[in-house]
Amino acid sequence: MKRLTPKEEEIMQAIWRLEKAFAKDVREALPEPKPHINTVSTVMRKLVKKGFLGFEDFGATHRYFAKVAKEDYSQEYLGEKLAGYFGDSYKEVVAFFAKEEKVSVADLKEIIRMIENPED
């Protein structure tokens, strides 16, 4: 799976939230300062070429939808980051956040519960 640029990722985040949207809707969902509508349209066309977006024709315009699930992209992206920074070790990731006090004891207990009972 190809990596997204920061602008592409920002637009994909909006599409994942909106599910189906026209370029103007995506633009409205982006944070300030909002890019020009032509920029949004150009990035969305690139995302179609990369296989991340599909579209339905509505006259002279398109309604876009994600062809790649957020979970699938996140899993691949996080896998790359883990390999690069933590030697592909989830234990090292959790230890890092615990040392940085970014995860609480309650969070860790919840993670353990989720590991022990994945069906819940």
Image: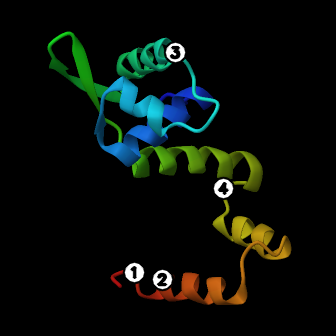
Q: Secondary structure at mark 2?
A: helix
Q: Is residue 92 above or below residue 85?
A: below
Q: Which sits in the foreground, 83 or 3?
A: 3
Estimate how packed mark 3 is, as few (under 14), some (14 to 19) or many (20 or more) residues with alpha carbons within 10 Å: some
Q: Amino acid at mark 3?
A: Thr
Neighbours of disc 1 within 10 Å: few (<14), some (14-19), many (20+): few
Residue at x 47%, y 87% (from the top left corner): 116
| Front position among marks 3 and 4 | 3
Q: Is residue 52 visible?
A: no
The residue to which callout 4 is attached is: 88
For the residues marked 3 and 1, what is the alpha-carbon distance in whole angstroms? 42 Å
Position of the N terminus, as image quadrant, is top left
Question: Which residue is identified by label 2?
Answer: 114
Q: Are marks 1 and 2 in contact (CB under 8 Å)?
A: yes
Give the labeled residue for mark 1. 118
| Residue 50 position (above or below residue 31) | above
Which circle, 4 or 2, is nearer the viewer?
Answer: 2
Label 3 to label 4, Cα distance in Å? 36 Å
71 w.r.t. 61: above or below: below
- Three-letter code, disc 4: Asp
Colour approach in the figure: rainbow
Q: Which residue is mark 3?
A: 39
Residue 26 percent coordinates (x, y)? 41, 32
Image x and y of residue 82, in percent: 66, 52
